Amino acid sequence: MKILIVEDDAAMGRALCYHLEQEGYETEWRTDGEQAYDSLAGSPFALVILDRMLPGLSGMDLLRRIRRERLDTRVLMLTALGSVEARVEGLDAGADDYLAKPFEVSELLARVRSLCRRSPLLGQDYPEAGGLRLNLPLRLLEGPSGSSAVSKREAQLLEIFLCNPGQTLPRSLLFTRVWGPHAPVEEGNLDSYIHFLRRRIRQVGGVCRLKTVHGIGYRLEIRGEGPC
């Protein structure tokens, strides 16, 4: 599983990477909130370990942005602010867990294991929802009526939708995750790929539909019965 570490203290950041990698996790380390947001927009993570006090975009502001854009990634907040009030504020803002510094490595790893067990399917090879299953290694969409090969871009979009069923995903998020934060992409490209995906879903008989949420983005809706 892939974990994003957001920590501006170099010694702490290196230590977190070391201990997590010793446990078999893949890590990415960022030292400020804006860098971390770009990483989250471009790649799925099972967990974010987030320092509260960061330069520029603070940990709290980053957390609020993550939840405002309805990213499902679990967030473990690390901070020197260990008061009850600070913990309540972090949890209310959307943190899944809150650990005060200093902490024991064994406790941190236990909390990471717990959150990763509860994490939605992110970065997995076979995400599925609504009767659809995406075989990422083969780039094959499978459903009750058969299977359909998909392109690389289609697979990237499908993975995001299947990992976040029922959630409205902003256009900006989809552009950033699939094409990158600074790619010169025309607005119509996303609409074209959504059209392709709707056709693929119909072909394989998935019990869902890609719904346009006007002015915002798209949502994968799971329907009670019948194909998309």
Image (cartoon, helix red, strand yellow):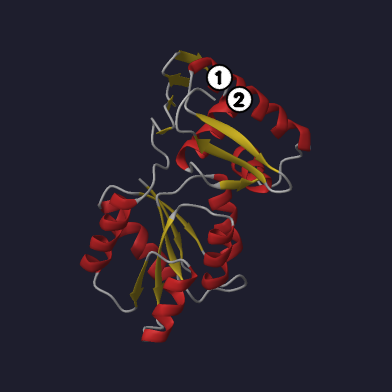
Mark on residue 167? none
Q: Is residue 156 visible?
A: yes
Left or right? Give the position of 151 relative to 1: right
As rendered, which of 5 and 72 lies closer to the eye? 72
Q: What element does badge 2 sit on?
A: helix
**What residue would you read off at disc 1?**
202
| Label 1: how many Cα within 10 Å (few below 14, some 14–19, many 20+) | some
The image quarter in which residue 135 lies: top left
**Callout 1 secondary element:** helix
Relative to 163, is 41 on the left or the right? right
Give percent across and percent down for residue 41.
Answer: 58, 49
Residue at 58 percent across and 21 percent down: it is 151
The amino acid sitting under disc 2 is: Arg
Q: Amino acid at mark 1?
A: Arg
13 or 183, nearer to the observer: 183
Residue on which the image places disc 2: 198
Quarter of the figure with the C terminus:
top right
Mark 1 touching mark 2, by CB under 8 A?
yes
The residue positioned 28% from the left and 47% from the top of the image is: 24
Q: Residue 113's image quarter?
A: bottom left
User: Which residue is rendered at x = 59% and y = 43% of the image?
Assistant: 177
Q: Quadrant of the N terminus?
A: top left
Q: Is residue 228 above or below residue 35?
A: above
Question: Looking at the image, which is closer to me, 136 or 219?
Answer: 219
Name the spot of residue 35 as percent of width and height, x first: 58, 59
- Residue found farthest to the left: 106
Is residue 32 something one can see in this rendering? Answer: no
Looking at this view, name the residue that lies furthest to the top. Answer: 146
Give residue 8's position: percent from left, percent from top.
49, 70
Q: CA distance from mark 1 to mark 2?
A: 6 Å
